[in-house]
Image (spheres, rainbow, N blue to C red):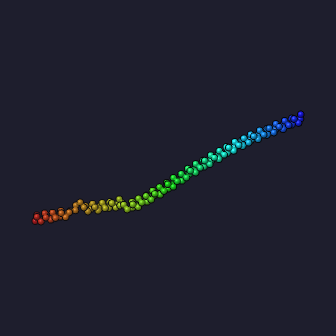
Amino acid sequence: MAIETTQQDASYILNEVVNRLRSLESKYNLITEKTLLINKNMIDEYKSLSRHIKIIESDIKEIKLEVNKLKEIIREFAKEFDSYARKENVKVLEKYINLIDPLKFVTEDDVKRIVKEVIKSE
C-alpha cells in the first residue's frame, strides 16, 4: 500500500506540475499575443506620426517660402517709397507755386488784346 500511495502522490504531483505548466504556457501565449498586438499598434502609430510630420514639414517649407516672398515685396515697397516726395518737399513746392501764382499769368492773346486796347486809346 505504501507503494500505491507513493505512486498516487507522485501521479498527483505530476498532474499538478503538468496543469501548472499548461497554465504557464497559456499565460505565455497570451502575453506573446498581446506583445505582438502592442508592437503592431506601435508600428502603425509610428507610420501615422511619420506621415503627419512629413505633412507638417511640407507646410512649414511653404510658409517659409511665403514669408520670404512677403519680405521681398516689403523691401520693394520700401525702395519705392523712397522715390516718392516727402510731405516737406510738397509743402516747399506749394509755397513756390503760391508765390508765383500761375493763374495770374497772361496768355499771348491777352497781351495782344491789351496792346491793341492801349494803341486804340492813344
In the image, 23 versus 60, the foreground residue is: 23
Q: What quarter of the picture does the C terminus occupy?
A: bottom left
Left-right relation of 75 to 1? left
Whole-percent x, y for residue 112 in the image: 16, 64
Horizontal side of 19 relative to 73 (left or right) equals right
Instruction: Please identify the quarter of the rendering in which residue 15 is found.
Output: top right
Residue 10, compared with residue 89, is above or below; it is above
Residue 92 vertical position relative to residue 28 in the rendered view, above or below = below
Quarter-of-image position of residue 83: bottom left
Q: Residue furthest top?
A: 1
Horizontal and vertical percent position of residue 7: 85, 37
Q: On the rendered structure, is 28 left or right of 110?
A: right
Q: Residue at x 84, y 35 (%)?
A: 8
Percent of width and height locating residue 58: 52, 53
Number of numbered markers? 0
**Residue 21 rendering spot, x and y as whole percentages:** 76, 41
Residue at the image point whose x is 47% and y is 57% from the top: 68
- Image quarter where the N terminus lies is top right
Q: Name the residue: 22% across, 61% down.
A: 104
On the rendered structure, is 7 left or right of 117? right
Nearest to the observer: residue 58 or residue 69: 58
